[in-house]
Image (cartoon, grey):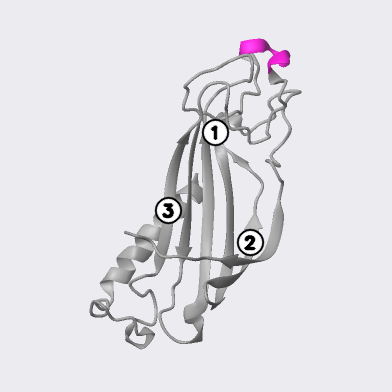
Amino acid sequence: MKKLAWILAFPVLASVLGRAQSAPPASGSTNAAQERMFLPSDTFWGWAQFDLAPPHNEIDPNLCAGNAGQYGGVNAPCSLFARYMLSGMLEARPFGRGPLRRFMVFGAPSFLFGKTIPKTLYTWSPDAIGIEHSWGVGIFIAKGFEFRVTQHFLFDRLGARNTNLGPADLGNNGPWGRYVTVGVHKSFGTRRW
């Protein structure tokens, strides 16, 4: 839980620190030389999303075998199929001037909730299952291209589900296990709002 608290507290603390420094540049100004050196006005960018999976179409983080219902029916211990998902992306570009202004760090957590067993038990329970997260660093190259290194971690189970849940339990590898990627990210277009 301490990890979770820091994941949520860091953006708030950084935002408060950013506001405590000097005021942002005049409106319409795009000159990087006028930005603050550390924590400029556009340090954080991100999005959050809440998803609901209807019955018979649950989110499968690949923690329990698809036939988990054969190991206890509606009382099977391995019920790690999600009904709800809260996910997001947070990018931080902490430098406003100099060569480091192209540097950024990012995180992308996905929280899963529910208690469902395919073809056996369908509930609307909001029981916490766990968190799947990744983080990385990137450097803006030019024309919307960024070079990124991303670390994807194993799935972290929460609460009472952080134990072996019987013969249907597949472990904490999640859909792809733990991996690191090196890649190029391309963004394009502008937002209407």
- The residue labelled by disc 3 is 47
Which of discs 1 and 2 lies nearer the camera? The answer is 2
Left or right of 108, for residue 74: right
Which is more toward the observer, 127 or 33?
Answer: 33
Which is more toward the observer, 12 or 27?
Answer: 27
Which is more toward the observer, 88 or 142?
Answer: 142
- The residue labelled by disc 1 is 159
Mark 1 touches mark 2? (CB < 8 Å): no
Q: What range of the chain is rendered magenta?
A: 69-74
Total number of numbered discs in the rendering:
3
Q: How far apart are marks 1 and 2 (CA)?
A: 27 Å
- The residue labelled by disc 2 is 150
Q: What element carries label 3?
A: strand
Q: Is 91 included in the stretch rendered in magenta?
A: no
Q: Position of residue 107 (x, y in %)?
A: 52, 57
Left or right of 36, for residue 78: right
Q: Which residue is drawn at 28% across and 69% down?
A: 19
Mark 2 touches mark 3? (CB < 8 Å): no
Q: Is mark 1 on a helix, strand or loop?
A: helix
Q: Quadrant of the C terminus?
A: bottom left
Q: Distance between the residues labelled 1 and 3?
A: 26 Å
Q: Which amino acid does label 3 sit on?
A: Trp
Q: Which amino acid does label 1 sit on?
A: Gly
